[in-house]
Image (tube, rainbow, N blue to C red):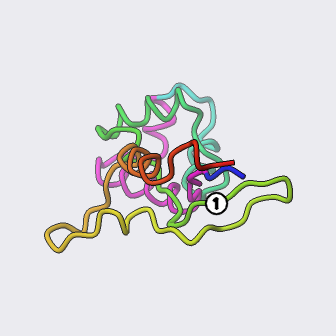
Amino acid sequence: MKQFPVIDMAATGENIRRLRLARGLTVRDVQRWFGFEEPQAIYKWQRGESLPTVDNLYALGSLLEVPMDRILVPREQLHIYSSSGPKPAAFDFYSLYSSEKSSRKPPLSAAFRMTSARWPLSRIA
């Protein structure tokens, strides 16, 4: 079994909407910036029905002036994938970063580094 972080599509969509509004952009502004003929892709991202491709995620980060890992929202649990399908694991990404000083969640890349340090690949069968 292998453990993988999972992206929360609904929370990521809400985050895209929130970041867009914080920059004062409309969906049409984003559509035009990407050169899309229709705005449906942006609406699907915001509803959590789909995620931007890696290229579009990178471009969206540039437009919204945030790194890509500040757009994506991980689920609070890792999922263990086996031949029988995904199963939630009892692990909270952000419990590793709990601090009285800051309630801000760390970037996803930091969570990946911490996760791999806590669960070395040699222990994952």
Q: Residue at x 73, y 54 (%)?
A: 81
Q: Residue at x 59, y 33 (%)?
A: 53
Badge count = 1
Near-viewer residue (30 or 71): 71
User: In the image, 17: left or right of 87?
Assistant: left
Q: Report the residue that reaches farthest toward the left.
A: 101
Give coordinates of residue 5: x percent, y percent. Answer: 56, 53
Q: Using the image, determine if residue 16 lies above or below residue 62.
A: below
Near-viewer residue (67 or 121): 121
Give coordinates of residue 105: x percent, y percent. Answer: 32, 60
User: In the image, 35: left or right of 89?
Assistant: left
Q: Is residue 22 magenta?
A: yes
Q: Residue at x 47, y 46 (%)?
A: 116
User: In the image, 39: left or right of 118?
Assistant: right
Give coordinates of residue 28: x percent, y percent. Answer: 48, 41
Res 60 quadrant in image: top left
Q: Using the image, determine if residue 58 lies above or below residue 101.
A: above
Q: On the image, numbered disc 1 is attached to which residue?
A: 79
User: In the image, 6: left or right of 93?
Assistant: right
Helix, strand or loop under label 1: strand
Q: State the predominant SS element of the stretch in magenta.
A: helix
Give the crowd class for mark 1: few <14, some 14-19, many >=20 residues within 10 Å: some
Residue type for callout 1: His
Residues drawn in magenta: 4-33
Q: Residue at x 30, y 49 (%)?
A: 24
